[in-house]
Image (cartoon, rainbow, N blue to C red):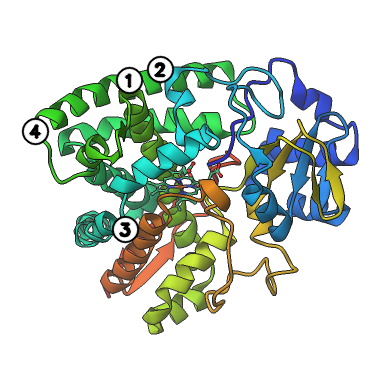
Amino acid sequence: MAVGFGHDPAGTTGVMSGRGPVDAVAHALMATLEGRTDPYPLYEELRAMGPALRSEQLPVWYLTGFEESRQVLRDSRCGKQQDGRGIVAGNRSRGPDETRQVTMLFMNPPDHTRLRGLVSRAFTPRRIESLHDRVVSMVDELLDEVAAAGEVDLIDTLAYPLPVRVISELIGVPEADRDAFRPLTAALVKTLEPIVSDDDAAAADAAAAEFGLYFTDLIAERRADPADDLLSGLIEARDGDDALSHDEMIATLVLLYAAGFETTTNLIGNGAYALLQHPDQLATLRAERGGMADAVEEMLRFESPVQLDGRRVFEPIEVAGVPIPGGDTVVTLLGAANRDPRLYDRPGEFDISRRDLPILSFASGIHYCLGASLARMEGRVVFDRLLDRFATIELLATPTWRGSLTLRGLDELRVRAACG
Ligand code: HEM
């Protein structure tokens, strides 16, 4: 997930527009629907201008290269701005509310190190692996619906319901309560976009408050009656005398939905669309199912579910030989880094035969996605079972992109699936 850029009451997007070549492209990328829908030509325009580009109007830098972005994400002289303020617009984004203050995604060391350490005690590889068989049966249940309908919107029938069910199962949210989480999460993640309207910010605050109330009750239930789930694990997690506070627990639970839900929806939706647009690749994957893990990596590279991330520079750094002063902000364009021609041959082509190439889709450094192995596992199960169940899957209509930039995903993906 990326740093939110906040409201735009000061008209920052207007200031950016047309004032210089970098701002003109950044404006097209962030402030126009065309740019957000197809950012790739704009990334190439930025790439052609140089590896580290400063906005002409704002103390903001744009990086399109893989190494440059990775360097900044891993540099301890860079980090999260913790004042709850937007980084491009420079004015107040959401909060700062108690939840945001203690959300690990927005924290720096040593607070981040402590909280991530505690959460990692509950979010263990063993817990993720133990979910595998449940994920397979959840996918199968959803594919039963696809099979029964024949023609479906794959986003609505599969890509949306699966991640919310998986996270809920992981945390231990009862089945009856799960449906309410989709609109709440959708409201939350809008604040991760580069530009956030006042209405969106208010809706996100309301959603966070609703999540907080819900989890307060669930935490009380689990304290009284622990189960074998992540929530009970968070309650038990200790480092010496240190444990998660109530607010930290709520912030972590909300973060798991905000960070893990729509991102995984987008991996499934974007990945399915990439396969359907490339029937040769789909046929290869059908014939060589051992290549599934690499195919999922290629889906994550080719249509990165998270397209951008960002860091505040605390002390002066140098990127690609260009000095960046402390106080400035760096936007790491992950979707561009994943198509860096210095690293990938034919970067704009979807090619599942690529092997062992790094990707930045889950970022890098201390905020590296905590759910990466869970998301990868869901991706592999989904595409494995889709191919097992259906002999043919055809695209029925050209899908539309949701129009957000940070989280890149489709509105709907209409397909006909037949068992053959
Ligand atoms: C394809 C799916 C996913 C993608 C592309 C993705 C991407 C990312 C990215 C880019 C970051 C780093 C943000 C930053 O540097 O500011 C991140 C962090 C995080 N992700 Fe994911 N994510 C995915 C799925 C998940 C899932 C399934 C979960 C958990 C259920 C999850 C939990 C988290 C958490 C807790 C963090 C914050 C880590 C920290 O700040 O230390 N993510 N994710």
Q: Are marks 1 and 3 in contact (CB under 8 Å)?
A: no
Local SS, label 1: helix
Q: Is mark 4 within 8 Å of ligand 1?
A: no
Is 331 left, or right, of 129 in this rendering?
A: right
The amino acid at mark 1 is Glu
User: For the point 32% across and 31% down, which residue is it?
Assistant: 244
Q: CA distance from mark 2 to mark 1?
A: 6 Å
Nearest to N terminus: mark 1 or mark 4: 1
- What residue is pinned by disc 3? 125
The residue mark sitting in front, 1 or 3, is 3
Task: Using the image, determine if residue 40 lies above or below residue 324.
Answer: below
Look at mark 1 in the image and give the residue it sits on: 210
The residue at 90%/36% (across/down) is: 20
At label 4, the amino acid type is Asp
The crowd level at tag 3 (other Cα within 10 Å; few <14, some 14-19, many 20+) is: some
List the residue tagged with mark 2: 206
Task: Report the amino acid beneath label 3.
Answer: Pro
The answer to whether 374 is drawn above or below residue 224 in the figure is: below
| Residue 344, x across and y down, in percent | 68, 71
Is any part of residue 183 visible from this angle? no
364 or 297, which lies in front?
364
Q: Around disc 4, counting alpha carbons within 10 Å, would you say few (fewer than 14), some (14 to 19), or many (20 or more)?
A: few
Q: Residue 319: in sight, yes or no? A: yes
